[in-house]
Amino acid sequence: MSFSTETKREICRKLSTREPLQYSELYAMLLLGREFSSKSIVFKTENEHTFSHFVFLINKLFKAKCEVVAPMKGDSGRNRSYIVRVISPERCRRIYEHYGHDDRDVTLRVNRANINDEEEQRAFIRGAFLACGSVTDPEKGYHLEFAVSYRNLCMDICRIVGEIQDFEITVRMLSRGGTYIDYIKDSEQITDLLTYMGAVTAAMNVMGTKALKEVRNAANRRANSEIANLQKTASASARQIKAIKKLKKNGRYNLLPDELRAVADIRYDYPELTLRELGAMLDPPISRSGVNHRLEKIIRLADEEDSGQKKDEG
């Protein structure tokens, strides 16, 4: 079961107890289903929980007889659709008019008279998400959207979600393949909206997944930093040992001052150690910067030897 499907199931389990809230929730599902007019009401969804929820509400609130077309048992194909059609044209007209719409409407818009308070607003948004919403599995990314067939209706949904008082939610809008999309990309805002709609478990999953990702990312950053430091240490150590070998080959190693030769001896014997670890092995111990200064001096002496040889050859 997808994360979005599980989220809708959680929302459907928490039925609004007050009838005005049920009317608001059903109103959003009617507007955003498939067809909503005085002559035809058709609701279509791929989610079986949303399908059952819609049938329950329209039967309870309007005693509407419906024709139900559901996927056949054993149909394992993806994107199966459940279709609910109100049979009686007279019942369609009654429902349409109940929500304040009539045949003079130029375009389908949200009648704000059906959303009288904050609780009805919450119920409406729940219904909108059930009808046309989806949310991405947080393991894959953070994205919640409402896919709407009409531009003006999409703008209405955008405004209503943006007006939520409890949370500050920024909704953006785009067009995709002839459909208009209201979407949210911020993980915290998605968590807030899921909580607002009653999908508390889904919200906790988003928060938990985000926290786990942050821990993983921090661990990866530390590991990458440690690898980079090891590579840097190995590269510097190889350069230092190369200089020491050069001085030994040319007989200048024994001419080094005691403090340089002491550092060179330890570096030669322990190529894997960091500068700080080398400094701790000296007697008396010296700082990391002190070890680095002495090793750089050894490298310069070896380079001077090369320069002197090239002059002699010239």
Image: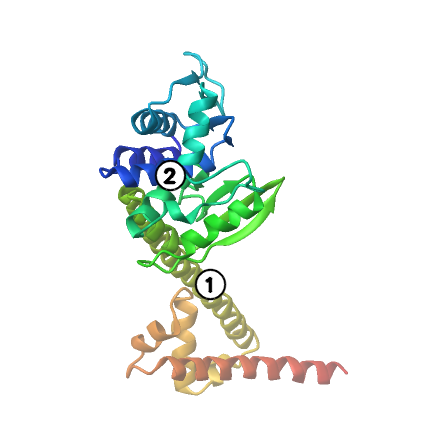
Residue toward you, 127 or 93:
93
Give the amino acid at mark 1: Ala
Instruction: Give the label on residue 127, or none.
Output: 2
Q: Residues within 10 Å of mark 1 (few under 14, many from 20)?
A: few
Quarter of the picture containing the C terminus is: bottom right
Q: How many marks?
A: 2
Percent x, y for residue 87? Answer: 45, 18
Which one is nearer the viewer's eye here, 97 or 8? 97
Q: Which residue is mark 1?
A: 228
Q: Nearer the viewer, mark 1 or mark 2?
A: 2
Of all residues, the one furthest to the top in this rendering is 73
Q: Is 15 on the left-hand or right-hand side of 88?
A: left
Q: Is residue 45 visible?
A: no
Residue 144 pos. (x, y %): 44, 46
Q: Which residue shows up at 52% across the image and 45% down it? A: 153
Q: Secondary structure at mark 1?
A: helix
Percent x, y of residue 76: 46, 17
In front: 33, or 302? Answer: 33
